[in-house]
Amino acid sequence: MRLLEERIQKDGIVKEGNVLKVDSFLNHQMDIALFQEMGKEWKRIFADVPINKILTIEASGIGIAAIAAQYFDAPVVFAKKTQSINLDGSVYSTKIESFTHKRQYDVIVSKKYLSPEDNILIIDDFLANGCAVNGLIDIIEASGAKLQGVGIAIEKGFQDGGKLLRERGIRVESLAIVEGMDAKTGKITFCH
Amino acid sequence: MRLLEERIQKDGIVKEGNVLKVDSFLNHQMDIALFQEMGKEWKRIFADVPINKILTIEASGIGIAAIAAQYFDAPVVFAKKTQSINLDGSVYSTKIESFTHKRQYDVIVSKKYLSPEDNILIIDDFLANGCAVNGLIDIIEASGAKLQGVGIAIEKGFQDGGKLLRERGIRVESLAIVEGMDAKTGKITFCH
């Protein structure tokens, strides 16, 4: 998606350790007009797919998923990190390793909000090694719901999360796939 | 807002300890069509106020704020709980006590995303003792930005957070104010 690639080129900051900071428009400050265009693009891509629910994970997936959900007329369920006293004990849970935070999370979704009748689109901001998406897929599989696809804003094409998901036959649609980036020059290249 | 009150009556669950569970439509599964109506209502209420940025706090404020932001043509900044390696050291920070999780969080906003030119609307899902909103106000004051108002989905009117904010002259607009609730009968009453 050219609009997103141009924005990453303009405002993304490359840091050592394969970190791409996009917090000026994607995951700290959120450019809602950009999110609308991303949501429309996912709807165009997944137009042929029955989707009645969007699943994401807190925190930075929530804004993107909420805006995108409007184009699918679907509710959003967000997986929560760590147990809350506001949730019943009856949850699907899995463990997810965070690339960003270098730690492991327990992630839960109430059993009330996923069922075998659901056709799910996963939406998230980043796909790198695929830990978050794989955790969400574990939860979907435990619920009996059907995973219809995965919509990612920015995929790090040089890490293998996307490749492994596609090899499993999962439809992954990333709006921008970073081929490489250089912390010294700030240069970012995309796969097309 | 009648639509929200009716939804709370229909799907809200009262638990012991003044807990109101609304996770089927507000803060775990998110009813995006309801959020659109809430966003329109805040825009109607704050139509006379210059607002160029919406501030919320992760995680459950993000979806509501993102949808509401569309009616203000404004970006959203969400305050983050705990330090991330993806953030620079130059942040505004404060400590917030969570009613739900019975613990204290460090909450941060990058200095890049709040400035004295900003006119801020705070949006959040719940207002009870006001800790989260007070923390966000601390951050706004530290940045020199101007707080124009606070939009809350559900205020617990029997706790004093809203009262104390209004006594300080802060404009707080809650779409539903719960006057009382009874965990035994499940009965919920609203202030009008």
Image (cartoon, coloured by chain):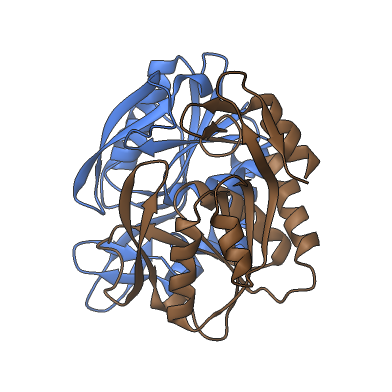
Chain colours: A brown, B blue
Q: Position of residue A98 (x, y in %)?
A: 39, 48
Q: Position of residue A3 (x, y in %)?
A: 78, 38
The reply, left or right, for residue B38 in relation to residue A73 is left
Q: Residue at x 62, y 47 (%)?
A: A157
Q: Is residue B1 placed above or below B7 in the rendered structure?
A: above
The reply, left or right, for residue A166 in relation to residue A82 is right
Q: Position of residue B113 (x, y in %)?
A: 52, 24
Quadrant that contains the C terminus of chain B: bottom left
Q: Nearer the viewer, residue B188 or B83?
A: B83
Q: Position of residue B58 (x, y in %)?
A: 42, 44
The answer to whether residue B10 is seen in the rendering is no
Q: Is residue A47 placed above or below B78 in the rendered structure?
A: below
Q: Residue at x 46, y 19 (%)?
A: B111
Q: Nearer the viewer, residue B60 or A158?
A: A158
The answer to whether residue A71 is seen in the rendering is yes
The answer to which quarter of the image holds residue B31 is bottom right
